């Protein structure tokens, strides 16, 4: 992964900023939680509403199913996969459940996760401990990264899979997916990657990395809002996966409306369940279209430039950052250690600066539309946080 840090030309950044109405009146440093709404996504949702009004249910056959196919195709291009390997879901938890419901835990009853993962990952298997599944945690020593040897020490012949993040949601540390895949596959286990905090800001090729499953969604760096998540399944696994608790969108001939016999689709759509939320699909397409225009590698270079600028200015103020020291492990997630982060974030919001917090941390996330002026205004407002 390149650590090249280069700002986009200012006139190009201004063209992108003009497509986000929020940026005309606020500083948005919270894509890590929710990407800003673009005029393109708004227009796409209005297009969906117009089709609904004009055609009613026939819009499914005229347009909507085709737009679902386009969402699979665009997401596939983004992660180096074919559209036939992508399933649509309403949220990452549902995508994870499709994977968890597909695995045989008879001989492999352990799942390895990281203690820095977002709770959604361990919860998926902790909720199944009554079925004899054991969740094992690879632990961090510094609250920023998890050394690869911590995973390696936990993976055994009883491990079904490693399920962990591409980018940790608090520290923004980027994990070495190729190395994790090697650790898992050495013991014939699988690797599931939660890329919710990575897709859109980190160039990713699932085939090159030998990832078995990848889940992600439109909420954050894909700038598509809530209600749409994606699941990639490696082609060599599809023939054996039969998720329980399935739905009619997974059926081979779903519009035959067969009730007495169920046959899974042959491709990645066998991992789907029910009817997609089309407003979310349209909003998601708007975000994907914009990201394709920018380019993930260029967005990352600009983002890292902004992170470097933020780091220099924060260090000059004596602020404590909780981010990786290695540039190849850095992302667009920057955390600042604060005693009362909720109060700080509330103060920043009063100044029109959108950030977020986690326990003990103020969390900010520059992206391709961020400028050094945004960073300067953020830090100046931070300096003026009223005393408790």
Image (cartoon, rainbow, N blue to C red):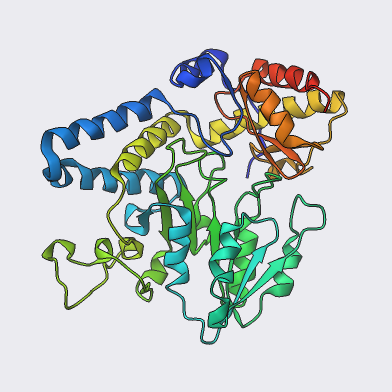
**In the image, is residue 207 above or below residue 31?**
below
The quadrant holding residue 298 is top right
In the rendered image, residue 258, in percent from the top left (x then y), is placed at: 14, 71
The relative height of residue 95 versus residue 106 in the rendered view (above or below) is: above
Q: Which one is nearer the viewer's eye here, 276 or 102? A: 276
**Residue under the point 82% across and 53% down:** 142
The answer to whether residue 56 is visible is yes
When the figure is inspected, residue 253 is found, relative to residue 342, above or below; the finding is below
Q: Residue at x 40, y 46 (%)?
A: 227
Residue depicted at x 14% and y 61%:
255
Apparent side of residue 327 relative to residue 108 in the rendered image (left or right) = right
Q: Quadrant of the N terminus?
A: top right
Residue 87: where, in percent of width, then height?
36, 57
Relative side of 99 to 180, left or right: left
Query: Looking at the image, is 48 positioned above or below residue 22?
Result: below
Residue 26 point in image, percent of width and height:
57, 19
Q: How many numbered badges does the structure rendering display?
A: 0
As rendered, which of 88 and 279 lies closer to the eye?
279
Q: Nearer the viewer, residue 167 or 78?
A: 167
Name the quadrant containing residue 177. bottom right
Q: Quadrant of residue 388?
A: top right
């Amino acid at each position: 992964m390149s650590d090249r840090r280069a700002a986009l030309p200012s006139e190009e950044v201004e063209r992108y900023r003009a497509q986000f109405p929020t940026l005309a009146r606020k500083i948005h440093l919270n894509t890590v939680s929710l990407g800003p709404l673009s005029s393109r996504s708004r227009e796409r949702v209005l297009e969906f509403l117009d089709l609904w009004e004009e055609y009613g249910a026939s819009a499914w056959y005229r347009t909507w199913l085709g737009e679902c196919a386009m969402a699979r195709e665009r997401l596939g291009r983004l992660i180096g996969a074919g559209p036939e390997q992508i399933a649509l879901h309403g949220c990452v938890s549902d995508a994870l459940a499709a994977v968890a419901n597909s695995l045989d835990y008879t001989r492999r009853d352990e799942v390895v996760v990281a203690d820095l993962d977002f709770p959604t990952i361990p919860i998926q298997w902790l909720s199944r401990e009554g079925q004899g599944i054991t969740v094992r945690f690879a632990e961090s020593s510094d609250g920023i990264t998890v050394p690869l040897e911590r995973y390696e020490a936990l993976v055994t012949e009883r491990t079904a899979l490693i399920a962990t993040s591409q980018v940790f949601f608090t520290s923004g540390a980027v994990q070495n997916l190729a190395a994790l895949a090697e650790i898992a596959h050495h013991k014939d286990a699988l690797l599931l990657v939660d890329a919710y905090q990575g897709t859109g800001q980190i160039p990713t090729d699932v085939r090159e990395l030998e990832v078995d499953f990848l889940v992600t969604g439109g909420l954050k760096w894909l700038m598509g809002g809530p209600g749409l998540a994606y699941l990639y399944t490696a082609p060599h696994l599809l023939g054996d996966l039969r998720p329980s608790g399935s739905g009619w969108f997974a059926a081979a001939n779903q519009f035959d409306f067969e009730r007495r016999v169920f046959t899974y689709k042959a491709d990645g759509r066998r991992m789907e369940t029910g009817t997609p939320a089309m407003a979310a699909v349209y909003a998601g397409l708007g975000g994907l279209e914009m990201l394709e225009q920018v380019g993930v590698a260029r967005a990352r270079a600009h983002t890292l430039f902004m992170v470097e600028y933020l780091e220099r200015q924060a260090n000059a103020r004596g602020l404590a950052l909780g981010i990786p020291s290695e540039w190849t492990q850095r992302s667009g997630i920057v955390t600042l250690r604060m005693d009362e982060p909720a109060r700080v974030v509330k103060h920043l919001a009063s100044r029109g600066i959108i950030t977020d917090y986690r326990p003990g941390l103020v969390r900010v996330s520059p992206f391709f539309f961020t400028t050094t002026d945004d960073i300067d205004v953020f830090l100046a407002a931070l300096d003026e946080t009223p005393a408790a």
